[in-house]
Image: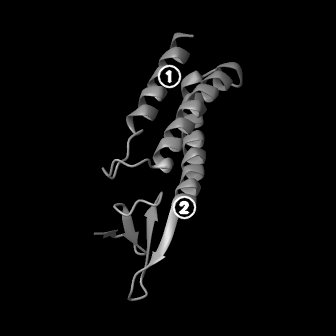
């Protein structure tokens, strides 16, 4: 049981370590946020399932659950980020997009920041 608690705690710490915007823009990045939440929930569920099924190894279950939950959360968050984008066209016909109607956080189609 001690191993399960340690595994759950370690997975939670790893999940919260990446819960900020890695690009430093200070905005809400749903991919990162929901990926971290998914990893935390997946680690807890994986530890519980791993402790009760198969070889009874909660650490392995927590690791597998964190990976699967993190991937699922990141995919969901990425879809949400795309839904939050607003597309615009400049006077030369080039497309760019902005997040949440904020004109200070805009990017060209190739991903470069628009200043």
The image quadrant where one finds the C terminus is bottom left
Helix, strand or loop status at disc 1: helix
Residue 68, horizontal then vertical, whole percent: 60, 42
The residue shown at (40%, 39%) is 18
Residue 105 seen in render = yes
The residue shown at (59%, 26%) is 44
* Furthest-top residue in this view: 2
Helix, strand or loop status at disc 2: helix
As drawn, 51 above or below 36: above
In the picture, the disc for residue 82 is 2
As drawn, 39 above or below 12: below
The residue shown at (57%, 54%) is 80
Residue 90 lies left or right of residue 69; in this view the side is left
- Which marked residue is nearer to the observer: mark 1 or mark 2? 2
Residue 114, horizontal then vertical, whole percent: 32, 70
Q: Nearer the viewer, residue 112 or 49?
A: 112
The earlier-in-sequence mark between 1 and 2 is 1
Q: Nearer the viewer, residue 14 or 19?
A: 19
* Furthest-bottom residue in this view: 92
The residue shown at (48%, 28%) is 11
* Real-space Cα separation, disc 1 to disc 2, in angstroms: 34 Å
Quickly name the residue at label 1: 7
* Furthest-left residue in this view: 115
């Amino acid at each position: 049981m001690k191993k399960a608690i340690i595994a759950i705690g370690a997975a939670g710490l790893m999940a919260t370590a990446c819960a900020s915007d890695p690009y430093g823009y200070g905005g809400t990045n749903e991919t990162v946020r929901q990926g971290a939440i998914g990893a935390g929930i997946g680690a807890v569920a994986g530890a519980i399932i791993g402790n009760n099924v198969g070889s009874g190894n909660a650490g392995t279950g927590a690791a597998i659950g964190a990976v699967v939950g993190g991937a699922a959360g990141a995919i969901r968050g990425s879809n949400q980020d795309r839904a939050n984008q607003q597309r615009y066209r400049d006077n030369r016909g080039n497309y760019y997009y902005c997040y949440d109607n904020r004109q200070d956080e805009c990017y060209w189609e190739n991903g470069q920041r628009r200043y």
